Amino acid sequence: MNLIKNDLLLRTLRKEKTERIPVWFMRQAGRYLPDYIKLREKYSFFERVRNPQLAAEITVMPVKQVGVDAAILFSDILVIAQALGVDVEILEGKGPVIADPIRTKEQVEKLDPANTAEVLSYALPTTKAVKDALENEVPLIGFCGSPWTLLCYMVEGKGSKDFAKAKQFCYQHPDLAAKLLDKITEASIIYLNMQIQAGVDTIQIFDSWGGLLSPSDYRKFSLPYLDKIVKAIQPKVPVILFAKGGWFALAELQATGASALGLDWTIEPSVAKKMTGSAVLQGNLDPIVLLGPAKNVEQETITMVKNFGVGNYIANLGHGVLPQTPFDNAKTFVETVKNFRM
Ligand code: 1CP
């Protein structure tokens, strides 16, 4: 085991004391980075993901250029759909598209988690290439989507404001939905174990569409599957659970035993603390603040870190950084956190 020089994130996840607050941000590896946008002209999205050297180069960019305290593997949550045998394309400006969405019993039965290690075999050389490129400077975060969020894309076939078709499928065929969620869970655990074997230091699970469910439906369609993944992974590396819009489930997400809970910007730090006691919290600046004037970025970031305080806290945005974010504002966000002392 090589020691990581800047291990602020890992120490915070273990609830140890740190000199300052660690900072990284969701979707930091791509999108708004000028050097990434240049690469996009030459290679398709999944070419970038499956080529270890390219994926490593993109993963390290925000560490070198923006100064974040952790790297996150360059990939996408949709690779789990591919592992199960579904064709997924990522179209420029449109996001994920599945030509043949999952809607029937026959389709669900055909999905096979047993092929995961083979379909996603590039994850091993890629993760190793990333670890080499990082030279033990900062920890590497591996990730997957939550089974519920994956179901949303696999049934809807594309991004959506309300994922009405995906939710309708769950209400009409709850048993089939449970089967699909089980298969996604199984593939996700295999994939996360591959990432851990190749050297990731921690895992974040993105339940990006968790907030579309009512609390009781969340307990049906999301929480049990997250719980299963946390129970399988948390004994090996710390798990961060991020459920966008899922503030109502914070106590239940904490009860899974995950090391940290991600927050979006719709919850006050004091309220999140009240709901979770001494949990490690991560978040939660509105990513749209980074589109505004630099002075406001600085002020809002200071207010955020003051309210969370140093200790048991990881600074982040409340959701992914937007593609139109000025590079300098991303940097101001990171530097403001790094310079902050209580
Ligand atoms: O930091 C990083 O960028 C690391 C790599 C990463 C991660 C963690 C990508 C690359 N995607 C993701 C996760 C991801 N993908 C999530 C969870 C996080 C979140 O909620 O933002 C989700 C919901 C997706 C699905 C997805 N893939 C979308 C969103 C579509 C929608 O419904 O709003 C999009 C646009 C993609 C494509 C994609 N994935 C990643 C990038 C950089 C892109 C954009 C395509 C490109 O730049 O070429």
Image: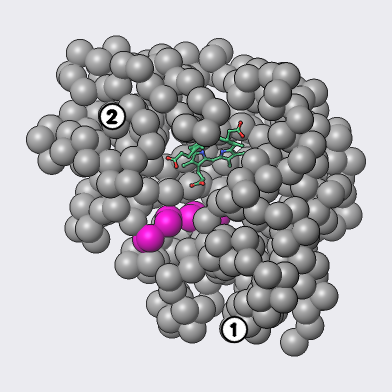
Give the x, y percent position of residue 242.
48, 55
Q: Is residue 166 above or below residue 318?
A: above
Pointer 2: what residue? 155
State which quadrant residue 295 falls in: bottom right
Query: Gap in Å between the C-alphas at discs 2 and 1?
Result: 39 Å
Kindly state the secondary structure of the residue where label 2 is placed. helix
Towards the viewer: 50 or 187: 50
Secondary structure of the magenta portion, mostly?
A: strand
Give the x, y percent position of residue 157.
33, 27
* Disc 2 residue type (three-letter): Val
Q: Is residue 92 magenta?
A: no
State which quarter of the image contains the C terminus: bottom right
State which quadrant residue 248 falls in: bottom left
Callout 1: CB less than 8 Å from ligand 1:
no
Question: How many numbered circles does the render carry?
Answer: 2
* Farthest-out residue, left: 172
Q: What segment is highlighted magenta in the picture?
A: 239-246
User: Could you tell me if the residues under marks 2 and 1 are in contact, i.e. CB atoms within 8 Å?
Assistant: no
* Farthest-out residue, front: 293
Mark nearer the N terminus (2 vs 1): 2
Residue at image position (29%, 31%) is 156
Packing grade of label 2 (10 A; few <14, some 14-19, many >=20) is many
Is residue 165 at least partly visible in the picture?
A: yes
Is residue 18 at least partly visible in the picture?
A: no
Q: Is residue 332 above or below residue 213?
A: below
Residue at image position (41%, 25%) is 97
Q: Which mark is residue 307?
A: 1
* Disc 1 residue type (three-letter): Asn
State which quarter of the image contains the N terminus: top right
